[in-house]
Amino acid sequence: MIRYSKRLDWDLGENALARAIAARSDPYIDLSEANPTRAGLVPDLDLGVLANPRTLRYEPHPKGAFAAREAVAAYYGESRGAAVDPERIVLTASTSEAYALLFKLLCDPGDSVLVPEPSYPLFGYLTALESVRAVPYALRWDGEWHLDPETVLAAAGPTTRAIVIVSPGNPTGAYLKESELTGLSKACERLGCALICDEVFADYPRGPDPRRVSTTAGHEPQLTFTLSGLSKVCGLPQLKLGWCVASGPRDDVAGALSRLELVADSYLSVSTPVQLAAPSLLGLRQGFQRRVLDRIEGNLFALARARAPDAPWNILQGEAGWSAILAVPSARSEEEWALRLLDAGVLVQPGYFYDFPQGSYLVVSLLPPEREFARAAEILARTLG
């Protein structure tokens, strides 16, 4: 019998919702769909930009093509007002790969990284694949989501090598605040660990907030890695281009980049066509982002309009992102509510997919077409009460 790695020792069985979807023959409205390319949201892309004749010449660089890194640096300058040195940028095939490279860089087997909860359920897999433990720290809700540096410190231990933050969070939509970053900087200094900030949804705010950290790229007090990519910035997940920006004290950044180059050079995973096209692709982002923000605004309005003033469920306020969180009555479990809604013709995600530490929640995507979403919102309102 073949013995498989313990890193893959996961429960691969289907949950009740997956079984119900597989058994269903009637159509339903999918409010779990967060892929813009399947929601009618694609940039106005001339495919000719991917047909550069230089594609036929292979000239790899561990950190990626310099022109592509310059384009990423320009993106930070134009969208965040941050001065980023292209030499401090490492290109990857995705944000997930950037995490994998960083866990290789920072951690030995058995070490740990701190991750937010609730959050996107990928961290457990990405850490396990690197023989690293994901240790959660809870975010706090009191009308808006908060990150408490003392809670983060309480979750830390002698094997902590990095603190992961997601700004804005998925699905919480909460941005990192300046006061929180100050506290995290002190925590990193005390623990002797790095800060990793995932900013893939940072271009989708629902309003201004002077407390907000615009980006951690260029954050110099501690060794910091800022992640993003074309998937969310431009709505092009299929082109597979992400990046990691290293910031912090000069010697720490130099040491990190020299090692990160070695790791990246072992894979060289980013394709030449997308690197050559990166300046043109990033130039398309504003039109795509405007369409997504308009879609989100319209769908949030439809969701609020469908909810009666005395309804037993609520829409949690979010600052950004492509999702909305619904607080639902605890008379039924999250999975029971999701199954009940599927029976009514709408697919949503139960909150336990995102490891909400307490309460009863459902998560819905705000990307589906407006008419479709409005019909789903009416079904939601009737079913939830």
Image (tube, rainbow, N blue to C red):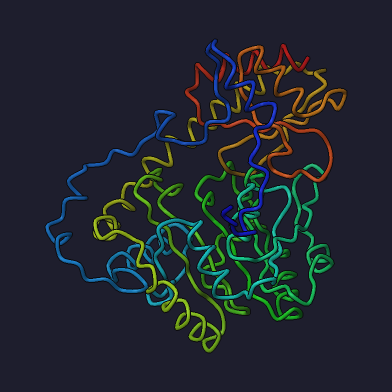
| Left or right: where 230 falls relative to 213 | left
Residue at coordinates 75% horizontally, 22% vertically from top-left?
A: 337
Residue at coordinates 53% horizontally, 89% vertically from top-left?
A: 251
Residue 359, image quadrant: top right
Residue 227 lies, with reference to residue 354, above or below; the image says: below
Q: Relative to the observer, which residue lies in front, 197 or 75? A: 197
Residue 81 percent coordinates (x, y): 47, 64
Q: Relative to the observer, which residue lies in front, 288 or 363? A: 363
Residue 286 percent coordinates (x, y): 38, 45
Residue at coordinates 70% horizontally, 24% vertically from top-left?
A: 338
| Left or right: where 287 falls relative to 245 | left
Please identify the residue farthest to the right as the structure is shown: 331
Residue 46 lies, with reference to residue 179, above or below; the image says: above
Q: How many marks?
A: 0
Q: Relative to the observer, which residue lies in front, 90 or 128? A: 128
Position of the C terminus by quadrant: top right
Please identify the residue farthest to the left as the structure is shown: 53
Residue 58, image quadrant: bottom left
